[in-house]
Image (cartoon, helix red, strand yellow):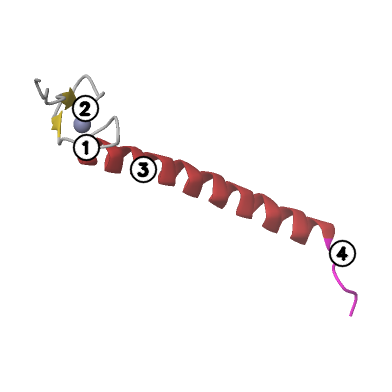
Amino acid sequence: MSKEAEIRVCKNKECQKVLPAGYKHKYCEACRNKHAETAKNVLKGLGAGAATVAVVVVTGGKINPKK
Ligand SMILES: [Zn+2]
C-alpha cells in the first residue's frame, strides 16, 4: 500500500505555492487574502456608490420645507 502525499499548488499561475496537506482551498493564504481584499474593495465601492445614490435620492425626493 502506498500512501501518496497529494501535492497541490496554488491555482494562481503566478504564485503556484505548494499548499499544505489537507488544505481545502485552491489558492494559498496570500492569494486568498489578496482576493478577499479585492472583493472587499469592490463591495466597498459598490456600497459607497449605493449610499451616495441613496443620499441623492433621499435629498432629491425631499422638498425643501417652506419657512
Ligand atoms: Zn498563491
- Label 2 and label 1: CA atoms lie apart by 13 Å
Taking the spot 68% from the left edge, 58% from the top edge, the residue there is 55
Q: Amino acid at mark 2?
A: Cys
Of callouts 4 and 3, the N-terminal one:
3
Q: Residue 55: in sight, yes or no? A: yes
What segment is highlighted magenta in the picture? Answer: 62-67
Q: Quadrant of ligand 1?
A: top left
Q: Residue furthest front?
A: 1
Closest to the observer, 29 or 22: 22
The numbered mark at residue 63 is 4
The numbered mark at residue 22 is 1
* Mark 2 vs 4: CB contact within 8 A: no
Taking the spot 34% from the left edge, 37% from the top edge, the residue there is 35
Q: Amino acid at mark 3?
A: Ala
Q: Quadrant of residue 10?
A: top left
Disc 2 target residue: 10
